[in-house]
Structures are given as structure tokens and as C-alpha cells.
Image (tube, rainbow, N blue to C red):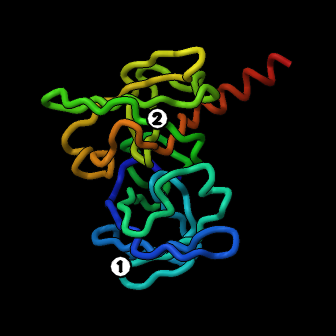
Amino acid sequence: MFSGIITEVGRIAAAQNREGGLRLTISTNVLGMGDVRLGDSIAVNGVCLTVVNVDGKEFTVDVSRETLNCTVGLNTQGAHVNLEKALRLADRLDGHLVSGHVDGVGEVVAFTDLGESWKLSVNAPHTLAKFIAVKGSITLNGVSLTINEVADHAAAGTVFSVNLIPHTLAATTLHELRAGGQVNLEIDLIARYVERMLAMQAE
């Protein structure tokens, strides 16, 4: 489990093809690898991955083909990635509960400079529309954000907007986004369970 508060922007130092997927070596500076052990979980661009090796300030993870098929940003050597270690039970929850299980890929519609902040508008798949609400939480590339606007389009899905303050842009990879780019989306964990309970009650 994660909070969506990014600890560091790391870099994919190596991406090696393996049967059924990729093996990634990710370099860090301030993440702190001293307490990371084999089998630990680290969120990489919002995707929960299992550590299979630790070497100084680098760690290695395996990414299955299935994960690569339903996410973005994990297959390019040299790419920057948002990193967050798994929460401890005693940690402060500054963002919201994030599982690291990506629900879909969204497309950036616009990235607008508002002066003191930036407005990021993303088109989400139609299947996620019912989970996206004004003032609700959503995770973009592992970053916990609050939804400010929602517009549903019958044919094109749902366009939602979030505001990004300068600190968020400086501390994450979101400043690299451009219109037409893609982002990993994880809807609010609580919303997912509410939807499941309502569906069961309706049967």
C-alpha cells in the first residue's frame, strides 16, 4: 500500500528483455535503499513492483508483459519515473490510500499554465467514468491528486482536470507531460469497493 506522495524521481538505468517481460534497473539518489529488502514493494510510476535485487543506490524489478500491456512509462531506458516505497502502518498518510494497481491509461488533453499553478486535463477510459468525481482522489503516474473538474462525453470517455502546484511539478515527473501523452490512472480504492458492494446489492 502507498500514499501517492512521491519520494524521488528515479531513472530507468537499464531495461533488459526477459521471457515474458522486462527486467528494470532503477537508479535513485534520495529514496534510501538501506531498509529495502528482496521482496519489498516499490511503486514505479504508480505501478507496484517487487524488488528482486538491491545494489547500492540501484534496485531491480521484473515487469511482466501483462503489466507492460496495461501501463505506460516502464519500457524506456533512461526515462524518469516517480518512486515511492511501501507504507508502514505507523506512517503518516499525507495523500490517499493507493494500491499500486493501475486501472487504466489516460491521455493528456491539455496542460495549461495558470500562473501560480498548472491545470492538467486528462481523458480517462469510459469504464472508469463512474469512479471519477469532483473533489475525489485519483492517482496519476503514482501521484495522489484531487479532481477539480469532470466532464463526461458519451463517445470519448471522461475528461477530468487537476491542479498542479509548483512543488508537485518539481518533485515528480508530471512536468514532462504534454498534450497527447499518456498517464497511468488508479481510481480511489474506496470508490472501487463501494461500486462492488452496490453491484452485489442490486443482484
Residue reaching furthest to the right? 203
| Residue shown at the point (39%, 45%) measured from the top left | 143
* Nearest to N terminus: mark 1 or mark 2: 1
> Of the residues shown, which amino acid type is indicated by label 2?
Ile
| Residue shown at the point (39%, 19%) measured from the top left | 149
Above or below, 34 against 112 in this view is below
> Of the residues shown, which amino acid type is indicated by label 1?
Lys
Image x and y of residue 168, in percent? 26, 44
Image mark for residue 57: 1
- Quarter of the rendering containing residue 27: bottom left
Image x and y of residue 17, in percent? 59, 74
Of 106 and 185, the residue lying toward us: 106
Query: Quarter holding the C terminus?
Result: top right
Badge 2 element: strand
Residue reaching furthest to the front? 180
Q: Is residue 158 left or right of residue 18?
A: left
Residue reaching furthest to the bottom? 55
Of 120 and 182, the residue lying toward us: 182
Q: How many residues crowd mark 2 within 10 Å: few (<14), some (14–19), many (20+)? A: many
C-alpha span from label 1 to label 2: 30 Å
| Residue shown at the point (40%, 78%) measured from the top left | 58
Image x and y of residue 34, in percent? 39, 78
Image x and y of residue 35, in percent? 43, 75
Q: How many residues crowd mark 1 within 10 Å: few (<14), some (14–19), many (20+)? A: some
| Residue shown at the point (32%, 51%) measured from the top left | 173
Residue reaching furthest to the left? 115
Above or below, 198 against 9 in this view is above
Badge 1 element: loop
Residue denoted by label 2: 138
- Callout 1 touching callout 2 (CB < 8 Å): no
Q: Is residue 31 left or right of residue 2?
A: left
